[in-house]
Image: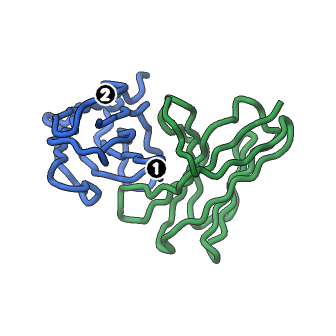
Chain colours: A green, B blue
Amino acid sequence: GESVGLHLPTLSVQEGDNSIINCAYSNSASDYFIWYKQESGKGPQFIIDIRSNMDKRQGQRVTVLLNKTVKHLSLQIAATQPGDSAVYFCAENQAGTYKYIFGTGTRLKVLA
Amino acid sequence: EAGVTQFPSHSVIEKGQTVTLRCDPISGHDNLYWYRRVMGKEIKFLLHFVKESKQDESGMPNNRFLAERTGGTYSTLKVQPAELEDSGVYFCASSLLGGAGEQYFGPGTRLTVT
């Protein structure tokens, strides 16, 4: 599988605890944001998205929070499970463009 | 429904050689994107096709990279001649709609240039 890089920030969480992964985005004109999960040897998989007219969105076991004032995005995972171990990327999209700008990623390790 | 597929999964070539990566998007997706992740850094946009037309190739690093999407179906990304710094993972993604909306990613092609 793909190596995730020597300097990737890592978050270690006990199984069953909640995880919070943070991301600072770069462009104040970005109006759409996505969290992706990447497991070893696989491509990024969609987790949850949020538009800039919202500050919170909930999915199944996941919540995304958006703070436009400080250009900050977070992903909360409730009751973290071993299967949640992966690298998590935030991505931003500016209205009128088609490309995503990705953050550097955070590796989540779930401890049994 | 089949997802985005990429071929090969891994390629090892020598500096100066040529490599062609292939991406098959999800059927019916007009939008196709190439991204890459080098040296464990962030995933970076390379270019975007709508059908067979290049809409945005602002992320292409230099003229050693050539992307095509003849017929608006699958796409190829050729690197000629390859350099050491081209090593990384090349991802393809597709989407039904352009702009804000989920892009579906393939598993990536790991390119190693020695």
| Total numbered circles | 2
Q: Secondary structure at mark 1?
A: loop
Tell me the kind of residue under disc 2.
Ser
Whether residue B93 can be seen here = no
Compared with A27, B21 (above or below) is above
**Residue B94 drawn above or below residue A20:** above
Q: Residue at x 76, y 44 (%)?
A: A12
Pointers 1 and 2 in contact (CB under 8 A)? Answer: no
Q: State left or right for residue B54 relative to residue A6.
A: left
The nearer-to-camera label among 1 and 2 is: 2
Residue at (64, 62) in percent of width and height: A73
Residue A1 placed where, x, y %?
A: 50, 28
For the residue labelled by badge 2, is the local secondary structure a helix, a strand or a loop? strand
- For this rendering, which residue is in front, B94 or A106? A106
Instruction: State which chain disc 2 sits on.
Output: B
Q: Position of residue A24 (x, y in %)?
A: 60, 65
Q: CA distance from mark 1 to mark 2?
A: 31 Å
Q: In the image, are marks 1 and 2 on the same chain?
A: yes
Residue B44: x and y, percent? 39, 53
Q: Which residue is mark 2?
A: B11
Q: Is residue B38 left or right of residue A12?
A: left
Q: Which residue: 41% across, 22% down?
A: B2
Can you tell which mark lies on residue B55?
A: none
Question: What residue sits right under mark 1 in the picture?
Answer: B101
Tell me the kind of residue under disc 1: Gly
Instruction: Please tell me how crowded label 1 is: few (under 14), some (14-19), or many (20+) other residues with Cα within 10 Å.
Output: some
> Residue under mark 1: which chain is it in?
B
Q: Is residue A14 left or right of residue B79?
A: right
Is residue B69 at all visible to an observer of this figure? yes
Q: Is B71 located above or below residue A29 in the figure?
A: above
Q: Residue at (29%, 44%) from the top-left corner?
A: B84
